[in-house]
Image: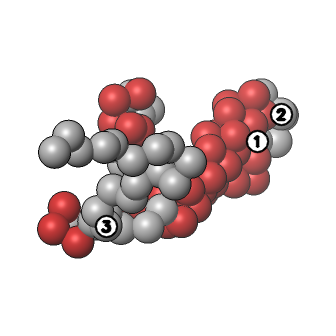
Amino acid sequence: MTTQAETATIANSEALAKAIEHAQEADRLISNDLYRSHHDRAAAHAVISQAFSALAQATAQQPPPVPAAFEPEPKRRLWLPTRRKNA
C-alpha cells in the first residue's frame, strides 16, 4: 500500500500505473473468488484504484509552474488611493 507521504508527491503516470495495478488486482480477486470470501478486499482495491485515477486526473489538469522570471509584475489595486509624494 502507498503511504500518505508517497501519495502527496506522486506524479500523473505513477498514479495511473497504481490505478491500473489496483484495478487488475480487484478484477483478479473477483474472477477467482468462487465462494465470495475476498469480495471485501476486491472492493477495497477498486476504491483505491478510483482514488488513484482521480489523483492522476487532478495532477494532469494542473498547469505547469511558471518560472519566476516570467511572472507578471504585481498590479496596483485600482480601488486603493495612490501614495502622495511630499515635495
**Is residue 61 in view?**
yes
Q: Nearer the viewer, mark 3 or mark 2?
A: 3
Residue at 75% across / 53% down in the picture?
31
Q: Which numbered circle lies on residue 36?
A: 2
Colour convention: secondary structure
Instruction: Compare residues 2 and 30 and report the one nearer the observer.
Output: 2
Q: Is 74 on the left-hand or right-hand side of 40?
A: left
Q: Earlier in the sequence, mark 1 or mark 3?
A: 1
Q: Give how far across and how far down residue 34 sits, in percent.
A: 82, 42
Height in image: 13 above or below 41? below
Residue at 33% across / 56% down in the picture?
74
Instruction: Compare residues 50 and 26 and report the one nearer the observer.
Output: 50
Q: Label 1's element?
A: loop
Q: Which numbered circle lies on residue 55?
A: none
Q: Earlier in the sequence, mark 3 or mark 2?
A: 2
Q: Is 4 on the left-hand or right-hand side of 27?
A: left
Height in image: 83 above or below 63? above
Q: Is 53 on the left-hand or right-hand side of 44?
A: left
Q: What's the residue type where badge 1 is placed? A: Asp
Cβ atoms under marks 1 and 2 closer than 8 Å: yes
Q: Give how far across and how far down residue 22 sits, in percent.
A: 56, 49
Residue at 76% across / 42% down in the picture?
33
Q: Give how far across and how far down residue 38 sits, in percent.
A: 72, 31
Q: Quadrant of the N terminus?
A: top left
Spatial separation of the CA atoms under disc 1 and disc 3: 58 Å
Q: Look at mark 3 in the image and give the residue it sits on.
A: 72
Q: What's the residue type where badge 3 is placed? A: Pro
The image quarter containing residue 19 is bottom right
Q: Give how far across and how far down residue 3 sits, in percent.
A: 39, 28
Q: Look at mark 1 in the image and give the residue it sits on.
A: 33
